[in-house]
Image (cartoon, rainbow, N blue to C red):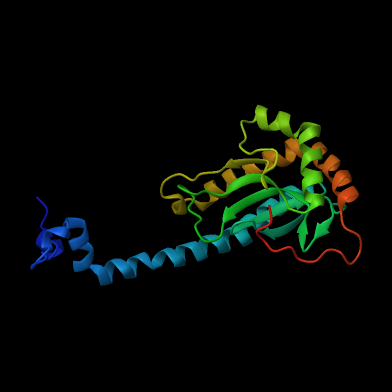
Amino acid sequence: MSDLDTTAYQPIPAKGVGAERFDEPALFYLTHQAVIDEWYSLRKAVTGALNDWLETTVREAISEVAQRHSLIIGGANGPRGQAHVVAYPDSMPVIASRPAVGIGLGWSRDGVNPISNPPFACVRRIGRAAGKAGAAALLEHGGRDFRSRESCRGRDNDPWPLYSNIPARPQWWTDLDAYLDAIVRGVERYIDGLTGALAAAVAAAQSAAPGPGDDSDEGEDEV
């Protein structure tokens, strides 16, 4: 039998008029509020560490895959608080520091959780005409077939017309090499299967790209 003194964790009861409104979970939180709040704040530290890992270690690994396909690598924020590392041909139009269409990895910068809200392999397009035209061409030239064949998520008009979550196993941080391998394989599957479609996206995006001096930042929440 455990020697742990569970009485130290018992909530202090409420007293007075209306005390019955405070149930046991509420009383437990009030009793241990300082400790609970301190532990909860550690979520920010975990999120920061995971963002750093994705933006450095994972980006470097995806970059090696991109180089094998003669693609370059870049970052792209948005929409809705998402971050991305994407691969794209050097001929792809880049508008407001974001490629019109790219293939890579996306994740929620503020709420990433490798189990409940995992990073995802994706095709990511910007909300300007070049991005929409490029994504439409990619879908027409094999993207829809890839989505059906590989059971990808996404809809034609979404910022991510194709995406697949890459969830981690419990206690993923104890084997980062295994999770890195899963992420890279997930992204590489997209790059391998969509290289030809990406070439079609380049031509369409170039036709719809703005002229010189008309590439002002549209904000990261474009759709």
Q: Position of residue 220 (x, y in %)?
A: 67, 61
Front residue of 222 and 3 = 222
Would you say 49 lies left or right of 184 here?
left
Q: Residue at x 15, y 62 (%)?
A: 9
Residue 110 against residue 133 in the figure, above or below:
below
Would you say 45 lies left or right of 139 here?
left
The quarter of the picture where residue 80 lies is bottom right
The answer to whether residue 88 is visible is no
Give the tally of numbered discs: 0
Q: Position of residue 66 (x, y in %)?
A: 75, 49
Q: Residue at x 69, y 56 (%)?
A: 222
The answer to whether residue 208 is visible is yes
The quarter of the picture where residue 94 lies is bottom right
Q: Position of residue 54 (x, y in %)?
A: 59, 58
Q: Position of residue 190 (x, y in %)?
A: 69, 40
Front residue of 89 and 3 = 89
Residue 92 against residue 19 in the figure, above or below:
above
Would you say 97 lies left or right of 26 here?
right
Front residue of 193 and 125 = 125
Residue 150 against residue 74 in the figure, above or below:
above
Residue 22 against residue 34 in the figure, above or below:
above
